[in-house]
Amino acid sequence: MKSVRSITVPIPTKASTGITGFDEITGGGLPRARTTLLVGGPGSGKTILALQFLVHGAQVCKEPGIFVAFEETSKRIVANAESFGWKLAELRRKKLFFMDAHPTPDLIQSGDFDLGGMLAALEAQIEVMSARRIVFDALDIVLALLPDTAAKRREIYRLHEWLLARELTGVITLRASGNETSAVSQQPFGFMQFMLDCVVILNHCVVMGVSQRNLRVQKYRGSGFDEDELPFVIGKGGFDVAIARALGGVDAKATNERVTSGVKRLDTMLGGGYYRGASVLITGFPGTAKTTLSAAFAEAACRRGERTLFISFDSDGTEVIRNLASVGIQLERYVKNGLLRMISARTITGSAETYLVRIKTLAKEHRARCLVIDPISILSKSGNELTAHSVVERLIDWSKAAGTTLVCTSLLDEMSGQSEGASPLQISMLADTWIHLNYLVQAGERNRGISIIKSRGMAHSNQVRELILSDVGVTLADTYTAGGEVLMGTLRWEKERSERVANEASEVAGKLKRVRLDAEEAELEVRVKSLQTELVAKQVEKALLARATESRKGELSRGRTRMEELRGADAAIPGPK
Amino acid sequence: MRRFRDRSEPAMNRSAKFKFRLYVADDAPNSAQAVANLSALCRTHLPDRHEIEVVDVFREPKRALADRIFMTPTLVKLAPSPVLRIVGTLSRIQPVLQALGLEISAA
């Protein structure tokens, strides 16, 4: 058994970058012992990506690295990277070396030269720290100093050969002019794209005033990769590449646990509440109590003791709390005891990607089990139309994977007509449960109606209910259908009242009848009793009579006998006198 | 700036010794060229008042690292001050002479 073990452990063919999303799309990172070309315009994040690759190597993979800086001084790079919390100062001693190779402005150049000096110097440094990773940042700067194309080509080959021979995992960054990444191939060193094993293109553009960053793996020899242009953001911890869950990824575990929506009758309509970890969409026009409904959920979650994050994109947290208190939803105490975190994001601008990253970070920080986003439709505001849909997809995917129950509201545009499905983000397709709030204008009133449009995996009511806000909270009332029309508000109340009156009348009538019957019964009973008494009297009378007759008969016979005796054997007298 | 020039000008023109250090990469063609070009330049413009040290970065890589030599060949003029760096084979003589302040005597 042991001999089997001693066979050399296969060295992973990829060097992890530690960048969320990037390792996933490349199947593990950059090609090990090969060189990757990183191309991007100004401010596209080349240096940060390259540096993160080194930092991750030094911190996590035990692969020390060297950063060769042609563009900026190492001091500035370190200072800029400080904000990502990478602790460079600590790493710099042994695991991360910065080589300042930027040409000084007063450098005089005369005739041809090569990079032999740099490679020799690097050789020495690699030996000292046994470096495994190396980054050449903005190689084009030094290439530009070379007098002709042939020399540039020669130096690139030299560098490449050198990297391969030392089995270093290398990253070379090149500045592309503007956003035209295709322009790189026209540059004298454009052939690098063909020569190197992996090419990653970073793109930074502005759509309707909103900055959008994209990353694309153009080629990756000997490996599959995600070929799409993927949005990314540079966040607090560095790069964050947005990826949808890969095919064949592990599904989130679905549970049968239900959580209350915070409204009792809505739970009943849903057959017990939302599923834990489900995503719930509440759509409706302005003022249809979307926020209230979502806050009812948040309150119920806090009451269960679950950490909850409430992100409001249209009001301040304190305003939301005050407004909700007026309908009997008390959130303040949960904010005070830390269960609930209210985030007001009214003035935050940025791309939908940025929002997603921020939401994810906040939720992680708060360890939220329940998340409310009010409204999510803000993500599709101008400049983000193209990306918002995919952002929401990933938001839902992420919340499912994390087991977070997500309740989002979505504002429907009054102008988009009354069609129910016209959610601009089309997230109605993605959500597990979709509750729609609507106004019903009828008889001079505007009433709120609630209905469940869909709810996956649970039996749910098909009824439209009236949503009533009062100072004790949210309640749902039955609606009446009369003559094919749904009655709400005062009409419903009137209908209810008339029914109540009719009920009362019939009740009274019933009572009256019972009393009358009782009386009749009593009367009959009395009559029965008197008749019985009479009967007894008659019977007694009859008995008396019988006895009297008997005794008289006896008397008579006795008397006759006595008389006969007295008369002394008198002849029998015919009848008494 | 002005003071600076006052001090260096007379020195340059007459007896001041030029101290050069030339970093080369082994026997690379452009390094060899630089050595040849520098010797020729010194012979012509600085007879008997120059000193050349040749450093091979492959033999002394740590020195290259410490001195921040990334391109070879690199010529460093150590004296007279200021320290000056010239990269390349030194085949374009004019800018080199200009940088060394030897233009006048060359003309």
Image (cartoon, coloured by chain):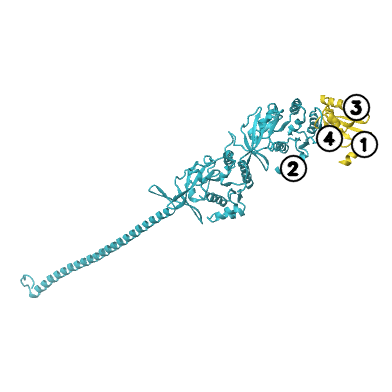
Chain colours: A cyan, B yellow
Distance (Cα) linking label 1 and label 3 = 19 Å
Report crowding for label 3: few under 14, some 14 to 19, many 20 or more residues within 10 A (C-alpha). Answer: few
Q: Residues at marks 4 and 2, common chain?
A: no
Which of discs 2 and 3 lies nearer the camera? The answer is 3
Discs 2 and 3 lie in a common subunit:
no
Which of A260/A111 is in front?
A: A111
Residue position marked by numbered label 2 in the rendering: A79
Q: Mark 4 — residue?
A: B67
Q: Are marks 1 and 4 on the same chain?
A: yes
Q: CA distance from mark 4 to mark 3?
A: 28 Å
Callout 4 secondary element: loop
Find residue A48 and report its horizontal and vertical position in percent: 70, 38
Q: Chain of mark 2?
A: A
Marks 4/2 in contact by CB < 8 Å: the verdict is no
Q: Which amino acid lies under the numbered mark 3 shown in the image of this protein?
A: Thr
Real-space Cα distance between discs 1 and 4?
29 Å
Q: Position of residue A92 (x, y in %)?
A: 77, 39
Question: Going by the image, does A103 lie left or right of A457?
Answer: right
Type of residue at label 1?
Pro
Q: Tell me, yes or no, whether the two marked residues, 1 and 3, touch with CB atoms within 8 Å.
A: no
Residue count near mark 2 (Cα–Cα under 10 Å), binned few <14, some 14–19, many ≥20: few
Q: Which residue is mark 1?
A: B10
Residue drawn at (37%, 48%), measured in percent from left and top?
Answer: A483
Q: Residue at x 39, y 47 (%)?
A: A484
Alpha-carbon span between mark 1 and mark 2: 44 Å
Provide residue A65's location: percent of width, then percent of height. Answer: 75, 35
Asked whether the residues under marks 4 and 3 belong to the same chain, the reply is yes
Which residue lies under the disc numbered 3?
Answer: B44
